[in-house]
Image (cartoon, rainbow, N blue to C red):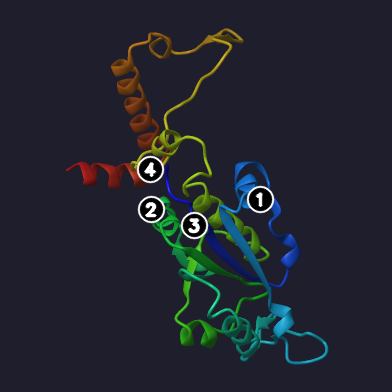
Amino acid sequence: MGGRVIPFQTTILTLFPSMFPGPLGQSLIGKALAEKLWDLAIIDIREFSFNAYKSVDDTPFGGGAGMVLRPDVLDAAYQSLQEKAVGPFYYLSPRGTPLTQEKLVSLSQEAGVTLLCGRYEGVDERFLQKRGIEEVSIGDYILSGGELAAMVLLDGVLRLRPGILGSKESILDESFSNGLLEYPHYTRPQVWEGEAVPEVLVSGHHARICHWRQEMAEKITRERRPDLWHLYEQRKN
């Protein structure tokens, strides 16, 4: 009998708490939330405003469009969870370190993670610097806020946690898990619109199947992601 799985502790600081759990409340990850394999704590940043209007932002010094989240409000929210939150603290930002599968694997081994979701033009730089908060990006594009990015990060982490997905083997074969994109998949019917499943996959020959899948993963990676292929070749050598 294995020991009880300790829930992965997630804490989200956001101006839009009703956005959560959102997609994270569905499918296997939603089932895991209901079964307390992971916990979700939502901190409403607006509750830490210092005035009756619940304002949390102000115009940027130096001019420019948009508004910036105030450091004093953010720090009040931050200080409120110091003894509750566990694991690293990240700010979802397009200028952050790119989120990779390797990073997700590392995070899945933590006790939890705390995520700050920005809005408007971003957050006051002094808050990030004073509290040593790392910025993480899910891609080279801009979203309206950090909430969707936080969900992407959490989905990627939680599916790697014990007991949440049914098959460990499926995780091992996925894109990026071994430096390559994933090989093609096929299921029934065996012939569809005149196209048959590759013969090797119905041969029952395990070694040939493994060889074919490796070849296809390498071919797809070489054609679609030369950057990944270059890194893969470097690791092999």
Q: CA distance from mark 4 to mark 1?
A: 28 Å
CA distance separating discs 3 and 2: 22 Å
Which residue is disc 2 drawn over?
102
19 is higher (above) or lower (below) than 69: above
Give the residue type at disc 1.
Answer: Ala
Which mark is nearer the camera, 3 or 4? 3
Amino acid tagged 2: Glu
Sequence-first disc among 1 and 3: 3
The residue under the point 49% across, 63% down is 112
Quarter-of-image position of residue 173: top left
Density class for disc 1 (Cα within 10 Å; few <14, some 14-19, many ≥20) is few
Q: Is residue 5 above or below residue 163?
A: below
Q: Position of residue 121 (x, y in %)?
A: 64, 76
Amino acid type shown at disc 3: Ile
* Rendered image: mark on residue 34: 1
Which image quarter holds the C terminus?
Answer: top left
> Please, what secondary structure does the residue beneath circle 3 have?
loop
Q: Residues within 10 Å of mark 3 (few under 14, many from 20)?
A: few
Q: Secondary structure at mark 1?
A: helix
